Image (cartoon, rainbow, N blue to C red):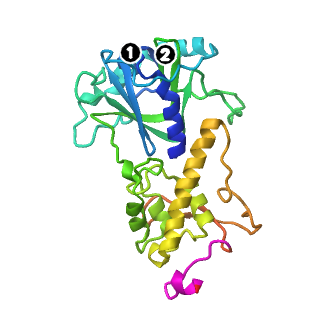
Amino acid sequence: MPEGPSVRKFHHLVSPFVGQQVVKTGGSSKKFCPTGLQALWLQDTQVHGKKLYLRFDPDEVGPPGNNNPLPEHPQKGAQREEALGSSRQGTCDEALHSSELVAPQGADGSDCLRRDPPAEGPERWLQIRFGLFGSVWANEFSRAKKANKKGDWQDPSPRLVLHFGAGGFLAFYNCQMAWRSSPVVEPTCDILSDEFHRGQALEALGQARPVCYTLLDQRYFSGLGNIIKNEALYRAGIHPLALGSLLSPSRLEALVDYVVEFSTGWLQGKLQGISQHKQIYQKEHCPAGHQVMKEALGPPGRFQRLTWWCPHCQPQLSIEKPEESQLS
């Protein structure tokens, strides 16, 4: 799924629409009924880690919370989406048996699966979780970058499309949606938040556990994904399976620094339309010219993630010789 910097970019695209009314909806999802969002006002948007939150209200509430001007939008694809939206209006009954629209934690989900969103009740925040290749497009649609197995150039189909009163629209691809009473926000563990708690992160990394497992633990490194994991470990010169308890405090500090530095640089590059340079992820050789190793790593019985590392630049530590003695 998209990592923190990508979701922050999505938030940047959505923010100019805050304060506007949804006038038309569309989308290909058969598990979430978009028509219930019509006539609602987008009042706020927040991002935490890998999740995007949109607040909708039935009435306009005060001035818009965002002063950014609405970007100009091309007309290309508008007629195609209008047809798409009208063709999907009959899918609301199927939403009653949806598995995509996840019930809020601690609730039976009955309010979430109604024909209309619970905008008049306590749950006014739409939580959006993106799957693999999930994305948000503003005022344009995603286009096919290559032919499919049948040789057809078929454009991706958005799960949700929101048209706003000022004429612009948002298209959401490959995502799951659920109503929440408030954003599930813990900024102290969000790697791109000003409130990110380094002490908490360092304590988690210092456990007798492979550091590559801890880095992907969203309780301590929300927004951190496989790319950031690989790049930060390489830059810090740490083997993915190195036990955090064997690493010196200075090395753990450096690892957290590289996590924040790479993530921040990646986000800035995205906002400027510049691709972030990767040194180890999906590479055959490291910058020093060494052969790169690749293996699926993860906690036993849990999801395994492909991991790239250089055995020369990221040597493994032994239990008998912790880092302090090996560096002396």
The residue sitting at 34% across, 21% down in the picture is 93
In this orientation, which residue lies closer to the viewer: 226 or 156? 226
Would you say residue 192 is visible in this rendering? yes
Q: What is the spatial separation of the Cα atoms under label 2 and label 1, in whole angstroms?
A: 12 Å
Q: Is residue 263 left or right of residue 20?
A: right
At mark 2, the secondary structure is helix
Residue indicated by mark 1: 38
Residue 107, by quadrant, is top left
Q: Is residue 154 magenta?
A: no
Looking at the image, tell me whether mark 2 or mark 1 is earlier in sequence order. 1
The residue sitting at 64% across, 15% down in the picture is 76
> Residue 52: x and y, percent?
43, 36
- Which residues lie in the magenta part? 313-327
The residue sitting at 28% across, 38% down in the picture is 104
Residue indicated by mark 2: 85
Would you say residue 298 is visible in this rendering? no
Q: Is residue 43 left or right of residue 293?
A: left
Q: Amino acid at mark 2?
A: Gly
Predominant SS along the magenta part: loop
The disc at residue 236 is none
The residue sitting at 52% across, 87% down in the picture is 321
In this orientation, which residue lies closer to the viewer: 127 or 203? 203
Q: Is residue 230 above or below residue 313?
A: above
> Residue 136: x and y, percent?
53, 31
Q: Is residue 203 above or below residue 161?
A: below
Count residues near mark 1 (Cα–Cα under 10 Å), then give few for <14, some for 14-19, many for 20+.
Answer: some
Count residues near mark 2 (Cα–Cα under 10 Å), then give few for <14, some for 14-19, many for 20+.
Answer: many
Q: Please, which residue is most extreme toward the right here? A: 289
Q: Is residue 316 magenta?
A: yes
Q: Amino acid at mark 1?
A: Gln
> Residue 178: x and y, percent?
35, 34
Quadrant of the drawing holding the C terminus? bottom right
